[in-house]
Image (tube, rainbow, N blue to C red):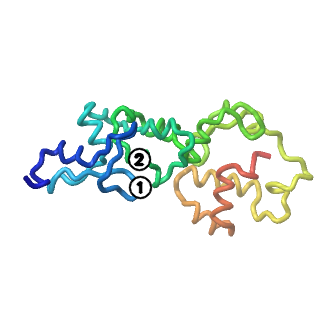
Amino acid sequence: MSRAALPRDARFFAKVDTAGSCWQWTGATSAKGYGVFRLGRREGTVLAHRFSYETLIGPIPDGLELDHLCHTNDHTCPGGDTCPHRKCVNPEHLEPVTTGENTHRGLSPWGINSRKATCLQGHDLDTLVLISGRIERRCSPCHQRPAAQPDQRCGENNPRSKLTWAAVTAIREAYASGGCTQKSLAARYGVSPRRIRQVLNHEGWRAP
């Protein structure tokens, strides 16, 4: 019997090494390091860990994705495309979670920051603010910092600044209205796109 004629489950588990706690996928992998399994000529390919979970546990609920618990619990793993846990297809190591929860548990800068309880000054991150269309956590003391003193070289008090408080306010209002891009605003006010991002993120330009 040819390999193509084998039952689908048999073809799949012939490429799984169950010797350890993590069941390592030995077949083809994606550019991101996840195992991929070819269902058939017409069905295409699926992620190996998803196929394993749905075969041995059941359907993945709509709107959820699988988190590799073996990676989440391994604090020595640097993550990334070479992470060995991405090849694990042990369904006991997989948990359906939301994208937000999966990111929160991960090692990306967003995941690491989402788990922080305090800012760099040690204040509790107790305030939610809308920054450039995103909800971010800030601490009350730093977010409500008093106005800059005249001798502080930030914002309009910086002699090298090309912008004024009036221009900063206009930039934020224009971007919030959705009628322009950061690149077009940079061209309009003669500054770099990076400076526009700083203005929108309230970096160096807080309310006077």
Q: Helix, strand, or loop for circle 2? A: helix
The residue under label 2 is: 86
Whole-percent x, y for residue 9 in the image = 18, 42
Residue 50 lies left or right of residue 70; in this view the side is left
Whole-percent x, y for residue 20 in the image = 38, 39
Towards the viewer: 4 or 155 = 4
Residue sitting at the far right: 151
Residue sitting at the far front: 19
Towards the viewer: 194 or 93 = 93
Q: Is residue 19 above or below residue 43?
A: above
Of the residues shown, which amino acid type is indicated by label 2? Arg
Quadrant of residue 111 in the image? top right
Disc 1 to disc 2: CB gap under 8 Å: yes
Q: Earlier in the sequence, mark 1 or mark 2?
A: 1
Towards the viewer: 86 or 160 = 86
Q: Crowding at label 1, few (<14), some or many (≥20) Cα neighbours within 10 Å?
A: few
Q: Nearer the viewer, mark 1 or mark 2?
A: 2
Q: Is residue 76 above or below residue 3?
A: above
User: Residue at horizontal 36%, vertical 32%?
Assistant: 92
Towards the viewer: 51 or 11 = 11
Residue 33 lies left or right of residue 42; in this view the side is right
Residue 188 badge: none
The residue under label 1 is: 32
Of the residues shown, which amino acid type is indicated by label 1? Lys
User: Residue at horizontal 31%, vertical 35%?
Assistant: 62
